[in-house]
Image (cartoon, rainbow, N blue to C red):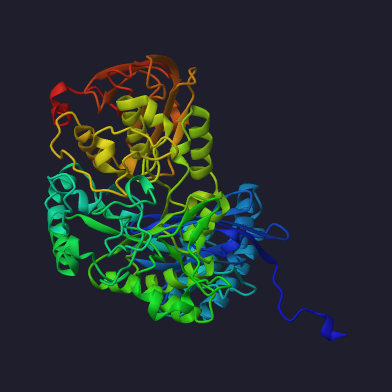
Amino acid sequence: MDSDFPHNWSRVFITRVEPSVEGGRWPIKRTVGEAVAVVADVVADGHDKLAVELIHGPEGGVYQTTRMTLRYNDEYEAAFVVNELGRYTWRVRAWVDRFGTWQSEFRRRVQHGETDEVLRVELASGAELLRELADGAGGAKREGLLRYARSFERGNAKKALEAGVVHLARDCDTRSGAVTSLAYHADVDRELARFAAWYEFFPRSCGDIAGVHATLDDAARRLEGIRDMGFDIVYLPPVHPIGTTFRKGKDNNPAVKPGEPGSPWAIGSPDGGHTSVHPRLGGLEAFDRFIKKATELKLHVALDIAFQCSPDHPWVKEHPEWFRHRVDGTIRYAENPPKKYQDVYPLDFSCGDWRGLWSALRDVFRFWIDRGVRIFRVDNPHTKPLAFWEWCLGSLRAEHPDLIFLAEAFTRPKTMYRLAQLGFNNSYTYFTWRNTKHELRSYFEELTQTQIVEFFRPNLWPNTPDILHDFLVHGGRSAHIVRFVLAATLSSVYGVYGPPYEHVKNDQHPEREEYANNEKYEIRVWNWNDPTSLQPLFRRVNRIRRENPALHNLRSLRFLDTDNGNILAYAKQDGANVIICLVNLDPFAVQESAIDVPLNALGIPSDGPYQVYDLLGGERIIWHGARQRVRLDPGVTPARILLVLRRLRTERQFDYYA
């Protein structure tokens, strides 16, 4: 019969711990210096007080203990700051707080006027409990408990009600019947994973003569201008040798003409594969010089990793077993019927030598890491096994916790989210196709106000070499300004395919949602000093982003109500720094709207005027109350980025922005 009884049991249950992703199956994401605010639901029978603590620290390091305080309704909270790269772990531990329960009951007896005799008996019980705790304590804590016990025995009721004694008793509690939650984890990245501006360009198009292939040394000469526009990361499409077999010509034409350079994503030739640099770009020596120049300018380099091969890739001959074959023995090229990509061979991740293939692919990352690259944009990761990414990224981040991986995964939401959970630090999004007020608000409320915010960092791109949306095509310059401001302020991480965007190139291919005369297939020449370009806008917005901590985060995004479906209004906040963004989503017409400013939520006084300063236009405005009226002219400024001021200031204090 005794075997029917539990071997261990407790009166306490931990029923929920947040933040967590799938009950702790996946880590949440943070960057160095951010806080993890933990909330735990802890219950027990009866009315006894509970002691709840948070045990936390870097995995494999020194763990700390933080007392959790009761918020309300059995919810306990505490927070800790992550100060190191890598993985942090935390657990919640809880037990019945015997002395805390005694003190609570004793306080009620005093408040309700119990007799001195009853209080003396209760004080003696409290003293006995303190002496029991002192038996297991040492040093100063033991002496402190005994001093309190002696004062109780002398009838000192005031001492019994002090906060210090309950904290000391809790520290020395034997924690009998304690329960501990499962372990929860956070992957801690460097700040660039949370706050960064990316700029994409093709090094081969950095020359000054039409049709002439530029080198990485030519590209390095463009870096200072990119830095001066305020970007943090320069992202290069694949820099590897390009195959000639089935090479695609202009605008993906299967009939290639002599001298056409081919797509950088058709990787591999007799000159090398994924660990080589195209000879016409200058080879590895030029790449190393490019990295050195970027580092001197405090720019970070992101490299495109595309795990696919041209028919000329060395692996095709060296490891034919790594590719899928038809029944006639030939290697299958990539297809998305009816589309055919004869210039690209996909890899077979489940081939007989899959371990050899996986190791070789991980070694590609290691090769570029050794040459100074710490940021990678990964092409189409959703078309490769998720198990591969979990293994590959996990092992690489264990070696180099400062790595950042951007998933170029335009696919179903749950697959995008799973890629983020298993290791990708940033992800492309549906932002490009969210253009109406309702679409933008509903999408970003999903990304910022649900559990998704714990693991998915949206990296917003208004354009890419593969995507030119109709909104930009038909809306022209005003639409380009609108989408850039949205990307740079809705998320704290964004990117732009720079040269065609800043020059407002909106010629769309007649059959596809991408640029005509696409730079993927030909060498372009850009006027890097065009005074009519959007470079001044880039500089100004990136400066605003850097100088306003509210724009460094995603979680504080709050949409404001407007009465015009073409006006999107939203706010972000970091302490006293409050930014309100107003955007006209109609690139063709002036739009006006009332907006409701949530004064209390944003910490804005409601009993007097307050000032907002337009960081884009340089205008100072005095507002009164919560409801305001705005007017946005797409021909002048289709967007405003407003800094909320707590007191009226002089014009001279804003010369810096002018």
State the image coordinates of residue 93 (x, y, percent, origin top left).
56, 67
Quarter of the view holding residue 128: bottom right
For residue 246, above or below residue 553 = below
Which residue is situated farthest in the right direction here? Answer: 1
Image-based side of 634 in relation to 533, left or right? right
Image-based side of 460 in relation to 157, left or right? left
For residue 58, above or below residue 585 = below
Of residues 333 and 220, the one nearer the viewer is 333
| Residue at x 37% of width, y 22% of height | 587
Taking the image as drawn, is residue 454 in sight? yes
Of residues 312 and 487, the one nearer the viewer is 312
State the image coordinates of residue 617 (x, y, percent, origin top left).
24, 23
The C terminus, quarter of image: top left
Of residues 204 and 189, the one nearer the viewer is 204
Image-based side of 437 in relation to 269, left or right? right
Taking the image as drawn, is residue 19 in sight? no
Numbered circles on residues, count:
0
State the image coordinates of residue 464 (x, y, percent, origin top left).
36, 44
The N terminus, quarter of image: bottom right
Of residues 140 and 416, the one nearer the viewer is 416
State the image coordinates of residue 253 (x, y, percent, origin top left).
38, 48
For residue 435, above or below residue 64 = above
| Residue at x 32% of width, y 43% of height | 518
| Residue at x 41% of width, y 25% of height | 585
